[in-house]
Image: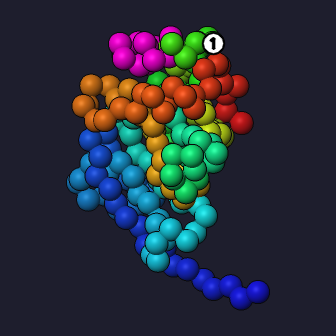
Amino acid sequence: MKSSLVLLDPRFDEKIWGSEHLEPWFESSGRKIGEVCFPDPEGDNLPLLVKFIFTTESLSVQVHPDDAYARAKGARGGKTEMWYVLRAEPGARIGAGFSRALSRKQLRAAAESGEIGSLLGWWPAREGQVWFLPPGTVHALGAGLVVCEIQVNNQITYRLFDFGRGRQLHLDDAVAVADTGPYPGPS
């Protein structure tokens, strides 16, 4: 079996919730960078994608489908993520799962009303934590974090709530794939 080295160049993506302070991992440019990705230079041939995520505001409340659901919708596959917390400012939090079990009807109503943000299970974030987020885990990163995300190399995401930013929501799909119970916490 022949293998070859693939060099990955970082891509700096500006985000409204991003940070101007990327040190010590990258040189800051004065722009609000939310993600530094290391994409496959030849397309989506690599099975994993590595990102550094920098937050100054909460990210959207979202969920990813499993392979079966994603393929039924015409996508290549589902998505699993893992976060490693590199930096957490005092008070930084990670939302994963819910503080109590919800019905799908309650989940949809909470997403529509904005109450979903207060129903998430919010956990104190600390440097060195590892968070495994299998498909179906409803999640959000809070402000004041730097995490290294390792994920399946696709961008299939269903957004439930976006803190008033006006981006498209995907309520039907999100509610269909969401695990509506509590999350066990960091690994």
- Percent across and percent down for residue 136 are 60, 33
Secondary element at image label 1: loop
Residue 181: percent from left, percent from top = 64, 19
Residue at the image point whose x is 49% and y is 31% from the top: 174
* Residue type, label 1: Ala
Q: Is residue 64 above or below residue 121?
A: below
Residue 64 relative to residue 23: left or right: right
Q: Which residues are magenta?
A: 106-118
> Which residue is nearer to you in this view: 183 or 131?
183
Q: Residue at x 36, y 32 (%)?
A: 169
Residue 95 on the magenta segment: no
Q: Residue at x 61, y 64 (%)?
A: 47
Residue designated by label 1:
101
User: In the picture shown, does residue 73 fall above or below 88?
Assistant: below
Q: Quadrant of the C terminus?
A: top right
* Residue 167 figure quarter: top left
111 lies left or right of 127:
left
On the image, which quarter does residue 23 sit in? Answer: bottom left
